[in-house]
Amino acid sequence: MTRGAVARVNRKVLFVFGTRPEAIKLAPVIEALRGRVAVRVCVTAQHRTMLDQVLSVFRITPDIDLGLMRPDQDLYDLTAAATLALRPVMQEERPRLVVVQGDTTTTFAASLAAFYAQTEVAHVEAGLRTYDKRHPFPEEINRRITSVLADWHFAPTPWARENLVRERIAPQRVFVTGNTGIDALLGVVRRLQKRELDPALPPKLLESFANRKVVLVTGHRRESFGPGFERICRALRDLVEREPEVVVVYPVHLNPRVREPVFRWLGTHPRIELLEPLEYVPFVALMLRADVILTDSGGIQEEAPSLPKPVLVMREKTERPEGVEAGVARLVGTNPERIVASVQELLHDSSVYRSMTAHENPYGDGHAAQRIAELIEQIVQGVVEPTLKD
């Protein structure tokens, strides 16, 4: 290739994301890529406030902010708005590669918009599956459609890669990289330990932890709306009634269908701390302090083993079975008796607790972003080294 031909190579990479989890998991990749290629960042702001908090922590200033968050918008509204808003972005930016992450509506819409613009798509955290299109909803379908639209697939684990290969995606376009969420988490933990970041937890909250076991809870999944959340709340109420040394900390999602049952069931108990949604850094600090984590979040299933904390997953199915197979996570669903019994076992049986915290994290080693950055650089140059293939 001549010098002139090298100069004409399009090295622009456009990152498109819209939610807090996407920002957390793409931030290390953006940092690792700067200086290698021309990086541009477009946010849909599917989640405005929570997204902005993460952008601040990781010092990312979007080049394009579509500002799509609207009160009470549903999946129809957001999908249509994101796809239409991304049309001029694709036309004006003309990237060589569009990078998306995970399984959000933004991920799906950006992949579709890039496909319409005949632009290649790289999918970070590809290959996660439950093979039940309603669990989780709508994320399972978002990730499966994105896999069809994507040209390059960065699978966090060998299991995720196998899913993609079974779906007849070309093996040479699928790479096992680890999960970038672990990179982000470990980076923030290091900054907290060096006191470069303020955990910003209220003193009164910290006082409530004194000489107590802390159970950290997150819950927001659509498939649990209604009876599922009623059962989860009953389990948490039963837990603190049976365990006088336990304090439950629950940063409550802003969705009214989450907040109504949570505050109705749990709002008056003195050992249940209901918090507004936390910024990323205070939440990491809470995970470090927790004894047990109860969650329906995918990202926390990946993060907790690196701290290391046992994680009980309040879902019937998970697209992240590696943690369950490794013994660092356990599916407990939304059955109150099962949830309470599982937490009590961890609190009172040290051998069980150790068995869930003594393993390496199956989701990553903290170097996924560097691997992905190397691959993206080679993709935009038109060369992918065989040594980086799985």
Image (tube, grey):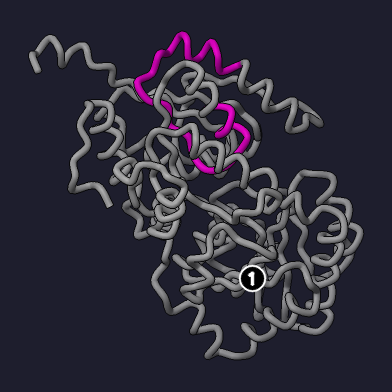
For the record, the magenta segment spans 85-110
Look at the image and tell me whether residue 100 can be seen. yes
On screen, residue 2 versus residue 337, left or right, reads: left
Q: Position of residue 301 (x, y in %)?
A: 55, 62
Q: Which residue is labeled 1 in the image?
A: 331
On screen, residue 269 versus residue 36, left or right, reads: right
When the figure is inspected, residue 15 is found, relative to residue 243, above or below; the finding is above
Q: Position of residue 262 (x, y in %)?
A: 84, 58
Look at the image and tell me whether residue 191 can be seen. no
When the figure is inspected, residue 285 is found, relative to residue 23, above or below; the finding is below
Q: Say which residue appears at 59% left-offset and 62% top-offset.
A: 286
The amino acid type found where label 1 is placed reads Leu
Q: Position of residue 176 (x, y in %)?
A: 34, 52
Number of marks present in the image shown? 1
Q: Position of residue 264 (x, y in %)?
A: 91, 58
Q: Say which residue appears at 38% left-offset and 44% top-offset.
A: 154
